[in-house]
Structure formats: C-alpha cells, structure tokens
Image: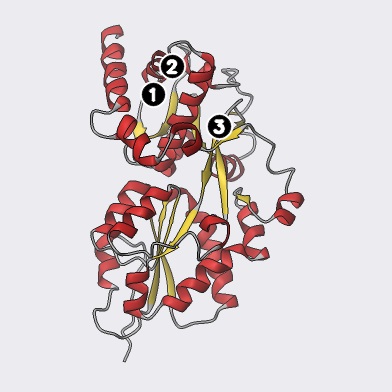
Amino acid sequence: MKKIALFSVLSFGLAACLWHTSTEQKTVLLNVSYDVIRDFYKEYNIAFQREFPSDVMISQSHGGASKQVLGVLNGLPADVVTLTQSNDIDALVKKGLVDADWQQVLPNGAVPFGSVMVLLVRKGNPKHIQDWSDLIRNDVKVVFANPKTSANGRFAYLSALAYAEQHSDKPQDFMLRLLRNVPVLEAGARSASISFTQRNIGDVLIAPENEAALAAKTLGENSFEVVYPSITAYTPIYVAEVNKNTQADGLHQLSHDYLSYLWSISAQELAAKNYFRPTDKKIIAKTTALFPEVNQFDVNQRFGSWEAINTKHFVDNGLFDRLYISAQRADKVNK
C-alpha cells in the first residue's frame, strides 16, 4: 500500500523523507531547480498534471544553483533537475546520477527556453543608468547574487566582465570598482531581488530578464523598469532526468514526459508569459514585443568551459575572491 507523503515547502530533510527505499513507486516527483524559475513551475505543474493525470504529486525544491547541485550529489532524491549551467548537470553525470546522453534525449540540447542578464532600476531611472559603465560610478550601489553560490550571480559577473574587456584597458580595475559598489551579496537571485525591490537596497539590480520583468510587473510598473545593457550573457535553462533515481523509484516515464512537455506549445507560451525567452520559433515570432533584441553572448564561447571559468574566477581565492576582498578593504579605508 502506497504511503501518502505530506509536505509543504521542501527542504533537504523533508525531501529525504519522501524517498522510498523499496521498489514501490514514489508518490512524489521532485523537481530540484535553481531559484528564480519557481513561478514558472507553479503554473507548469498544474498544466502538466492536467495533461498527464497521475496519482503522483509534483513538488519543487528551489535555491541557489550550487547549493541545489550539492544537495542532489549528497542524496537529495531529485527525479529531474532544472539548472542554468551544463557543468552542474555534468557533475551529476560523473556521480552516475544522470545519463551521459542527457543533452541528446531532449530537443535543443536540453534547453527549452532561456533568459538574458539585464539591469533593473527604480521607476524613472533616477540615477540615469544605461549600461555597465554606470555601475562603477561612485554614486551607484549595485545588487546581484553571489557568484560563489549562484549561477545567475556568475552570469551577472561575466556580463560585466565582457563589457569591461571591450571598453577598458584594465578590465580587472573596472570589476574592482564595480565590486566596491556592491553593499551585499545575496546567496541566490531571488534573495537579491528581494533585497533590491523590498528592502530598498541599492540603485540597480543585475538579474535575469525573467526575474527583473516579473518584479516590475508584480510590484508595480510604477516602481521599477528594465534597462537592457549594450552586451549581456544569455542564460540557458537546462533540464535533465536524474535517471538513477527515476529508475529506482518507478518514475522514469513520468519524469521523461514531464521534461518533454516543456517543448509543447502551451509550455512555451507559459514560459513567455513568465518572461523566459522561448526556443519555439513560432512562439518567438508571436512574442517579439516582450523580448527586445539584445547583443547577447554565450559565456562558454567567450570565456571557455565552465571548468576553465570556475578555475580562474570562482574557486576559493580565485579572481573574484581577490577582487571582492580588495574592494571591501578599499571601501573600509575610504570610510
């Protein structure tokens, strides 16, 4: 007889309680995702269950990408994952949790939609922020997620760095000046959004387009507006089945259907509604008003593999750590 799993907000401990060590099918399909996609999945899960009726409940676990991957590696019983760096899923492949061909079993390299990094400012743009160069001014405070714990924080940092490399003879000095203007580094993109929009910290938020647009819409169009910088990083959304778990708990087919449905017309329209840039060409053509053309780049084409990027910038005592520590020291001296 199936056990009934009672849950509200999933934490690692509660998710582990939903794991059945027997061969009996689980009663919950767990989607472990990075944090700013939670609003899309709230609606998507309802649409999917309407299309694929099942006794299995769908639950979500959201947080900073690095924390989420570490949780799955340490036993968080994910059936599917939604992340924005391919190397995070490759780490699950190396652990034997995800099949090596995860990008071949789904369309478009397992990317159903994506976003770009933008600047969210207060209505009227009182600091007249137009591009990355404005973020190093002495009168501007900048908020974004910590690149050490957040994939979107890494995309924010690399977007600014791409601009600096194009427009500055000393890009590291540019990044140092930007980091001196950062009053707080939140663990994830959603917490960074809350600091800027609800706690009124900072003059500009670096965030994914979907998060910035959602904040502007839900908190009032008279409160915030989105600024598109001259160059920015594309942030793909990767999805994958955690095959080791789904084979063990009898949810392989449902998990595959759950991910495949992301490429359906209705899911692509729902993605656009939540300000993610769809990959379906017909939906793209219908939503051009929502998504202005931007000068976007692929971080791996520009900066190399994620292994190379992380080794240079985001490991302990990497370039980001050294610049951030120097920025904090300089700020204390000036105070």
Tag 3 and tag 2, C-beta contact below 8 Å: no
Q: Which residue is mark 3?
A: 232
Residue flagged by tag 3: what amino acid is it?
Answer: Thr
Q: Which mark is residue 182?
A: 1
Q: Residue at x 47, y 10 (%)?
A: 169
Q: Is residue 241 above or below residue 49?
A: above
Residue flagged by tag 2: what amino acid is it?
Answer: Pro
Front in this rendered view, residue 149 or 280: 280
Q: Is residue 121 above or below residue 137?
A: below
Front in this rendered view, residue 139 or 161: 161
State how far apart marks 1 and 2 are (Cα).
Answer: 17 Å
Q: Position of residue 84 (x, y in %)?
A: 45, 48
In what quadrant of the picture does the C terminus appear? top left
Q: Which residue is mark 2?
A: 171
State how far apart marks 1 and 3 are (Cα).
Answer: 19 Å
Residue flagged by tag 1: what amino acid is it?
Answer: Val
